[in-house]
């Protein structure tokens, strides 16, 4: 920064670049030898200078020192504030009772074969993820498997973290549930694994679990059934409406 300087001989005032601090040279006005303040050196006045010359130089040096102190102090305060701002405390996220729990990791595919009532070959339940291909491809493959086995294809939308889905899965070997699911090929699609692709394919799920009837091309027909149809997730509540949906004709959008 420029150093304000007054010649002790003629009183001429000017601003001198800081790179010349402490150097000696002629005054631009009177030509007499002067030393630019900025270092703690003793000024030797020329022949025509009086005692006031030393005082002027000393005041100039003090002024420069005060300015430098202010600048350095301001810079230090700025750096301190920058460090404080650049390192905010890390927020802690806590999951309350009504919040969705964190993801449990990648969805694992599965294939289940469940027995049915006497005279029935039971039912199949398979879990598929995007690692098996796009949704349309997955449904075509599973639809072919269902036709080959002589079973009716349905899609189940669920989530591993949802307790109603867990309750339903744990009840599948109950005789009443086996009777309800008999002769079906259920394709389980995890809502977290498939995300928006479900909605784009026509599988709109306001809650889980929800079952969709499929047409011969593997597309949803619009006929659905969800937990709203049975209330508490117990076999005695779930089995009757599920049996009506799987084994008979269900009203669209149920």
Image (tube, rainbow, N blue to C red):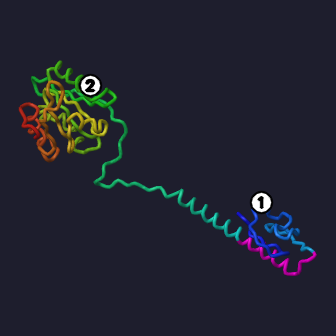
Task: Report which quarter residue 221 is drawn in.
Answer: top left
Q: Residue at x 15, y 26 (%)?
A: 122
Above or below — where is 81 with respect to 251? below
- Residue, disc 1: 19
Question: Mark 2 touching mark 1, by CB under 8 A?
Answer: no
Work out which quarter of the rendered image holds the C terminus and state it.
top left
Residue 234 at x, y = what percent?
15, 43
* Segment colored magenta: 47-66
Q: Of helix, strand and loop, which one carries label 1?
A: helix
Q: What secondary structure do most residues of the magenta stretch adopt? A: helix
Residue 154 at x, y = what percent?
17, 30
Image disc number at residue 137: 2
- Along the viewing direction, whichever of 172 and 86 lies nearer the viewer: 86
Residue 49 at x, y = what percent?
89, 78
Above or below — where is 168 with respect to 116? below
- Along the viewing direction, whichever of 4 and 130 lies nearer the viewer: 4
Task: Report which quarter residue 35 is drawn in.
Answer: bottom right
- Along the viewing direction, whichever of 208 and 220 lies nearer the viewer: 220
Above or below — where is 202 with respect to 18? above
Q: Of helix, strand and loop, which one carries label 2?
A: helix
């Amino acid at each position: 920064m420029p150093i304000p300087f007054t010649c002790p001989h003629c009183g001429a005032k000017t601003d001198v670049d800081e790179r010349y601090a402490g150097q000696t040279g002629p005054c631009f006005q009177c030509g007499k030898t002067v030393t630019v303040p900025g270092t703690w050196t003793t000024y030797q006045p020329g022949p025509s200078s009086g005692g006031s010359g030393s005082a002027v130089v000393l005041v100039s040096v003090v002024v420069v020192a005060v300015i430098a102190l202010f600048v350095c102090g301001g810079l230090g305060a700025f750096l301190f504030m920058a460090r404080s701002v650049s390192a905010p405390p890390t927020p802690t996220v806590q999951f309350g009772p009504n919040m969705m729990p964190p993801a449990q990791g990648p969805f694992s595919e599965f294939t289940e074969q469940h027995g049915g009532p006497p005279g029935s070959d039971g039912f199949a339940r398979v879990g598929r993820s995007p690692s098996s291909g796009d949704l349309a491809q997955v449904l075509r493959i599973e639809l072919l498997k269902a036709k080959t086995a002589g079973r009716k294809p349905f899609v189940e939308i669920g989530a591993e973290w949802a307790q109603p889905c867990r309750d339903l899965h744990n009840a599948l070997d109950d005789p009443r549930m086996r009777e309800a699911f008999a002769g079906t090929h259920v394709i389980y699609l995890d809502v977290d694994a498939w995300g928006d692709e479900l909605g784009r394919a026509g599988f709109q799920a306001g809650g889980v679990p929800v079952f969709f009837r499929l047409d011969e091309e593997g597309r949803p027909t619009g006929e659905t059934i969800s937990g709203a149809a049975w209330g508490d997730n117990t076999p005695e509540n779930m089995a009757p409406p599920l049996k009506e949906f799987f084994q008979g004709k269900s009203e669209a959008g149920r």
